[in-house]
Image: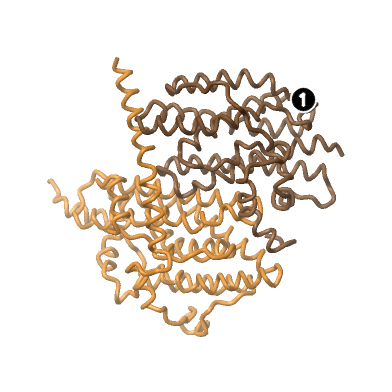
Chain colours: A orange, B brown
Amino acid sequence: MVMDPEMLFRDKIENEIKIEPKDWMPEAYRKTNIRQISQHAHSEIVGMLPEGNWITRAPSLKRKAILIAKVQDEGGHGLYLYSAAETLGMSREEMINDLHSGKAKYSSIFNYPTLTWADIGAIGWLVDGAAIMNQVMLTRTSYGPYARAMVRICKEESFHQRQGFEALLVLSRGTEAQKAMCQDAINRWWWPALMMFGPRDTESTNSDQSMKWKIKRKSNDELRQNFVDMIAEQIKTLGMTLPDPHLKWNEERKHYDFGEINWDEFWQVVKGNGPCNKQRLDARRKAWEEGEWVREAAEAYARKRVDKLKG
Amino acid sequence: MNQKKTSYILHLADNSLILGQRNSEWCGHGPVLEQDIAITNITLDLVGQARSLYQYAASLLGEGTTEDSLAYLRTEREFLNCLLVEQPKADWAHTVLRQFFFSTYQYYLCQQLLSHPDAQLAAIAEKSLKEVRYHVRWSGEWVIRLGDGTTESKQRLQLALAALWPYTGELFMPAAYESGQGTDLSAIRPLWNEKVQAVLREATLDLPGETFMHSGGKTGVHTEHLGFILAEMQYMQRTYPGCEW
């Protein structure tokens, strides 16, 4: 008996069998995955900018080497993710054009500036830490190429998070100026990191269907709570504080309670009014436009080679 | 302590660090993602080479010297890198051509250093050589691709060649501290010429004729670029002296 493709698809989702590129899938499932994976890829690429901002000024050769390697890893993640998204039938160039035109989004967190060296540690610890919460969940996402890309990415990201924490730990044990720099970075990055999990579950438009399709496996609020619980413990080792007077262990819930996110700021940054939205997109567009002649030359040369081989 | 020897090691380290610093300006801004990653990878190799060399020099100098005090607390006149590596990254043509000139030089130099009586230097050269072999191949391929690519890419490469060629002579003009280090620049020069000419020919470029060659970097007389490179690179160590990072 030939099974209806839609039933087969649902059956696979039900039984935790990954959906693969050549499998039949609902158009909306394809679109949702393209949107999400390409957005994720764009976040890796745009994310290279705030961190790359400190490579030439890293305070020691060791830190410089670690930072270069880290930013390079982000580029690598972008590459796997673009490849994963391409298996769904959209070319990398189309995705990049959508980024540059503003049609595609990337994580809002990268619209905040890296003002001091401590921001590099804070990004590693808080931003990569928040990203990992989401990414660990995505290693079990239903689309096979995305899940497999996430497994590789998670290994590197957890390494980055430890490096970020370690960089802050050194600051927290340093001079008064270093301690102040550390606390200031945590103060500035804490709330934007919480915003990375997206709107509250009650406000999240794409969540329901994504959960049914097992693209997403935990809700925004669930992930955010896990993150708060983790960081609220880790910060004790740093001897620093989180900028939230409402942060308090709740014995009944066995979770930390925490204050309300500034949702107005959240939506402003999403809409393009964050401190660096314009700079980030401008930098990406500039790199792409200035690289055009290089890409053209490479293509022209490759064509000549093929022609030569054909004789 | 042998001052000539430490100057020589610092010269090698400064070359790698300053070129790494320049190349790192591409990180996140490359013409295409794969090449952004490639140039950043080369940057990482260069910084790694510099670190090994500074660490070695610091161990010879003693008295609390560290890789960081050497990289971050020396001044413009104390840096001994050649002028070629401090030139601006400019466009992709300048970057890959400069890398090709430098890596080809470094390749033959590392080969000589392999048999250096100082085991530490020989070991650093051996490790670097593996990386440099790839740098030569990658940059050489790009030079050919741009030269034999489009009219625009050829034009840009020709401009880069005109701009950078006058800084290649210094690679082969020995500074006082280079004599007696077991390397022979006059033996490297013909090998370098041969390789460079072969690649430029394949790139369909006209070879530059005899021209004036700039020098001074190896003895600490730099172009105006170096001061800005150091101002940026050393800013944290200068602002917060004596801190751990």
Residue A58 drawn above or below residue A232: above
Outermost residue, right side = B1
Q: Residue at x 50, y 85 (%)?
A: A246
What residue sits right under mark 1 in the picture?
Answer: B182
In the picture, measured across the screen, residue A173 lies left or right of residue A13, that is: right
The image shows residue A159 at horizontal and vertical percentages of 55, 55
Q: Nearer the viewer, residue A275 or B41?
A: A275
Q: Chain of mark 1?
A: B
Q: Give the class, few, some or many, for how many residues have Cα within 10 Å of label 1's Cα (few <14, many ≥20).
A: few
Q: Nearer the viewer, residue B229 or B113?
A: B229
In the picture, measured across the screen, residue A107 lies left or right of residue A213, that is: right
Query: Which type of secondary structure does the marked residue at label 1 adopt?
Result: loop
In the picture, measured across the screen, residue A254 lies left or right of residue A88, that is: right
The reply to whether residue B142 is in sight is: no
The image shows residue B162 at horizontal and vertical percentages of 51, 30
The reply to whether residue A167 is in sight is: yes
Which quadrant of the structure image shows residue A169?
bottom right
The image shows residue A305 at horizontal and vertical percentages of 34, 23
Which image quarter holds the C terminus of chain A? top left
Outermost residue, front side = B212
Outermost residue, top side = A311
The image shows residue A163 at horizontal and vertical percentages of 59, 58
Which quadrant of the structure image shows residue A259?
bottom left
Q: Nearer the viewer, residue A198 or B49?
A: B49
Q: Residue at x 39, y 33 (%)?
A: B153
Q: Residue at x 69, y 36 (%)?
A: B216
Q: Residue at x 44, y 72 (%)?
A: A194
What type is the residue that disc 1 sits on? Gly
Residue B57 drawn above or below residue A63: above
